[in-house]
Amino acid sequence: MRKYLAFFRLRFSMGLQYRAAAVAGIVTQFFWGAMELLAFRAFYQADPGAFPMSFQATASYVWMQQAFLALFAAWMFENEIFQCIRDGSVAYELCRPVDLYGMWFARSAANRVSRAVLRCAPILLVAAFLPAPFGMTAPQSLSAFLWWAVTMVLGLAVTVGFGMLIYLVTFFTLSPDGVRMVAVSLVEILQGAIIPLPFFPDGLRQVLELLPFAAMQNVPLRAWSGDLSGQDLYAAAGLQLFWAAALVGSGWLLAQKALKKTVVQGG
């Protein structure tokens, strides 16, 4: 375990060096969040009673989504991992006395966390001081805050676990581009990145909430705003734990299968 924590710390430290990119990301995400809220506001003003979430809860959802975009964004992959699989330099990785899946998982998680750490504080600070109902509200209690923290960790585990499956599929394909594009498009919709899942029709929403994609950002963002609480929150966190274990377990098994059949050409 200590070895994987070392990989996490190393990648985390490297990620913190890209401060200029973080500043550009903060500006982009702040204005994107503002545009989203203005669009939602127009719909809410047209028919306030037609929406399953209050506008205040939606505003908190949007700001949290922008602040922690790096944690849950489906399109955020490490091209370095794809490249080392395609050009055969994965052979050097296999020389390390560590499990390849565990090492890549730690690196991927650290990469996301480091980017989120650089970006989240300024966005949350500005959002907290915006006038109601455009600003972000705090959790209703300490218990709600702790449950939000738990769901954030589980959501990150599910997101990284799913991303690891995309990396590993590259061992069996000539190019990861096709699988990557399909996966990103699918996950962006089904995890609530385009619109929150409560806005979907009830029958479809109930199905989507059982899938691993809903366990990524839908649960923690709604837990913060209070839209998800009580028994519903506990059940959602349990489902997150299930999907985290299922994705990590299946990813590890797929890695073992892939490495048994890996052939590196060219000396």
Image (cartoon, rainbow, N blue to C red):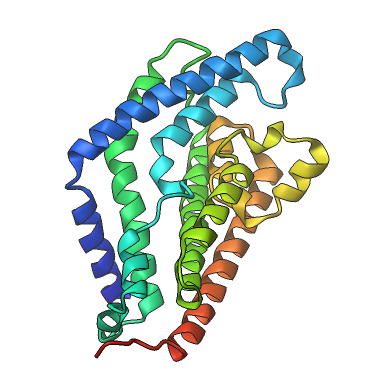
Number of numbered labels in the structure image: 0
Q: Nearer the viewer, residue 264 or 40?
A: 264
Question: Camera-side residue: 8 or 254?
Answer: 254
Q: Is residue 33 above or below residue 255?
A: above
Q: Nearer the viewer, residue 87 or 258?
A: 87
Q: Position of residue 59 (x, y in %)?
A: 53, 23
Q: Which quarter of the picture shows residue 263?
A: bottom left
User: Residue 31: x, y in percent?
Assistant: 39, 22
Is residue 55 or residue 19 the one in the foreground?
Answer: 19
Q: Residue at x 56, y 44 (%)?
A: 188
Write the residue at 28% across / 79% down. 93
Residue 144 place in picture, x, y as percent: 54, 38
Extreme residue in the right direction: 203
Question: Where residue 241 sits in the image (x, y, percent)?
Answer: 58, 61
Is residue 140 visible in the rendered image? The answer is no
Q: Where does the N terminus fall, quadrant-wise? A: bottom left
> Where, by quadrant of the figure, is residue 231 drawn?
top right
In the rendered image, the vertical position of residue 75 relative to residue 260, given as above or below: above
Which residue corresponds to the image point at 39% horizontal and 56% vertical from the top-left? 77
* Left or right, 104 with reference to 39: left
Above or below, 28 relative to 7: above
The answer to whether any part of residue 143 appears in the image is yes
Q: Residue at x 71, y 48 (%)?
A: 208
Which quarter of the image is occupied by the C terminus? bottom left
Whether residue 117 is situated above or below residue 170 in the rendered picture: above
* Left or right: 261, with 122 as reference point: right
